[in-house]
Amino acid sequence: MAIISFLSRMKIHPEKKDQFIDCCTQLTEKVLAHEPECLYFRFYKLRDEENGYAVFESFLTEAAEEAHMKTPYFEAIVPDLVECLDGPYVREYLDPLDS
């Protein structure tokens, strides 16, 4: 089994903070309720980076992560979330030391 895990870092426009947090909350609730192959999904505020946030995601397979991005709720929520970003996000893939 090839677990896929990554951390995506992003900055947001400060005036869009409430919208961003609302989108994050909605998406997290939907993912955790409807995606059994999602092992972990949670947004974080970056402590030492003004307006910086991150989401840590882990899926059983790459196919599960691809399916996640095609869900109706992902397609409905993510455009509003992306609207809050101040520049591109950076995705960092994480591989276990024992792989």
Image (spheres, rainbow, N blue to C red):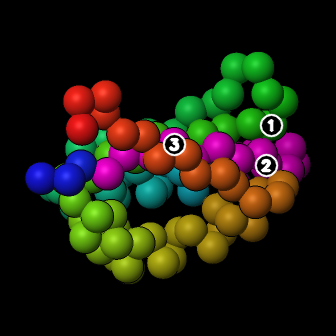
According to the picture, the residue beneath numbered tag 1 turns out to be 51
Can residue 41 be seen by looking at this rendering? no
- Which kind of residue does numbered mark 2 sit on? Ile
- Which kind of residue does numbered mark 1 sit on? Asn
The foreground one among 20 and 6 is 6
Q: What element carries label 2?
A: loop
Q: Nearer the viewer, mark 2 or mark 3?
A: 3
- How far across and down, in percent of the image, does residue 47 sit? 70, 20
Which residue does the image show at 75% across and 60% down from the upper left? 88
Q: What stretch is highlighted in magenta?
A: 4-20
According to the picture, the residue beneath numbered tag 3 turns out to be 7
Kindly check if marks 2 and 1 are in contact, taking CB atoms under 8 A apart as contact.
Answer: yes
Inter-mark Cα distance, 2 to 1: 6 Å
Residue 18 highlighted magenta (yes or no): yes
Inter-mark Cα distance, 3 to 1: 16 Å
Residue 87 highlighted magenta (yes or no): no
Q: Is residue 43 left or right of residue 64?
A: right
Inter-mark Cα distance, 2 to 3: 16 Å
According to the picture, the residue beneath numbered tag 2 turns out to be 12
Which residue does the image show at 32% across and 51% down from the upper left? 4
In the rendered structure, which disc, 2 or 1, sits on the residue that comes first in sequence?
A: 2
In the rendered structure, which disc, 3 or 1, sits on the residue that comes first in sequence?
A: 3
